[in-house]
Image (cartoon, rainbow, N blue to C red):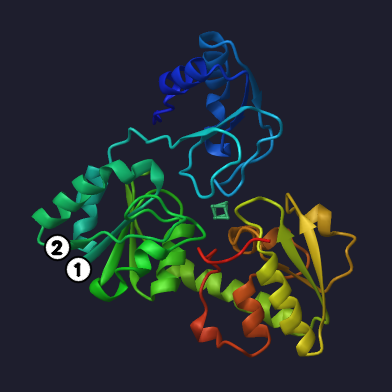
Amino acid sequence: MVEYDLELNKICKIINKKKYKRIMVQIPEGLKIYHEKIVSTIENETEAVVILSGSPCYGACDIVENDADFLVHFGHSMIKKPSIPYFFAECRANIDVLEVVKKSVGYLEKNVGVLTTVQHVHKINEVKRILERNGKNVFVGKGGKRVKYPGQVLGCDFSSALSIRDKVDNYLYVGSGNFHPLGVSLATRKKVVVADPYSNEIRETEKLKEKILRQRYAAIELAKHGERFGIIVGEKIGQKRFKLAKKLKMMLEKEGENASLILLNEIKPEYLLYLKYDCFVCTACPRIAIDDYSMYERPMLTPVEVEIVLGKRRFEDYVFDEIKDEEKRT
Ligand code: SF4
């Protein structure tokens, strides 16, 4: 079983030193199986009471504070500073990535950009050495303010990949899942090879990319027949893009469409059932429109896709939505 560094000793030391009493704990879905260990260790080793956030948590864009005096957020690096004292336990995975990286060598061209998630960023130098030993030129890009480590990518931020785009022939993404590599491939228009240390598999993303693009094309075509657009603004601190939502509303209205803003914290199909719009636009987490595609009865578009609906961007220039550093959230 893969183990993650939960940094519980460090967390308890901080709590004892600062005498914090109410601890808000946020754990992403994939690590929630460790909740008993986390809660009981903190409560046994300190004088504090833990409030475990039971709401789903998919990123550091989602910060829950309530009236706690200390926040412990697991599994992500910080995106936006909380307003109370905090600790981000980034949960490095103790899984070996080197075997699968060795397997990836034959799939890669000469100049390689290395990318990963926060769970494996501590392995980047070893990955680099293996690739270099096998004759590759390796580049590790520095992202924008929302990503903490060189080579790190988020599902809504591919800036570290874009920063080395002109130097590389292709990218190696070390990690699980396909969303991040697909996003990088669309953002950079370069090949992305996935080295998945959990399944010990090498994957190329081209076929999946075509399938996703077909789904997006269908959603965009349906939305072209729509007249009423519901533009969703996320309430979560790192996803709130009011400025973008207002811009999209103006853009749609200028073209004679009807558009309204909808504020939501959790975005679920059942919350949209009775809202009479022909399609929705999600300015919150960019993954919602893509990952949850089949769950919605009416098209759920990304902001980029609205540009295509209105003829302001060609489908050939399709990219995943990203949340940029400079976007004001109020
Ligand atoms: S907005 Fe979505 S993709 Fe970005 S960090 Fe949050 S959950 Fe992840």
254 vs 290, left or right, is: right
Q: Name the residue nearer the viewer: 259 or 21.
A: 21
Give the residue displayed 54% in from the left and 74% down from the top.
213
Residue drawn at x 73%, y 54% as measured from the top left:
267
Query: Quick check: 72 left or right of 252?
Result: left
Closest to the observer: 136 or 53?
53
Tell whether 177 sits left or right of 109.
right
Q: Secondary structure at mark 1?
A: strand
Q: Secondary structure at mark 2?
A: loop
Q: Which residue is mark 1?
A: 111
Q: Inspect the image, locate mark 2, and give the three-letter code of the amino acid beneath it.
A: Lys
Image coordinates for residue 55, horizontal then vertical, percent: 69, 37
Residue 205 visible in the shown view = no
| Mark 1 / mark 2, whichever is N-terminal | 1
Residue 296's disc is none
Q: Where is 5 relative to 123, above or below?
A: above
Please tell me in which quadrant of the rendered image residue 309 appears.
bottom right
Which quadrant does the N terminus fall into? top left
Q: On residue 136, which mark appears?
A: 2
Quadrant containing the C terminus in the rendered view: bottom right
- In this rendering, the answer to whether 31 lies above or below 143 is above
Residues under numbered marks 1 and 2 in contact, where contact means CB atoms less than 8 Å apart: yes
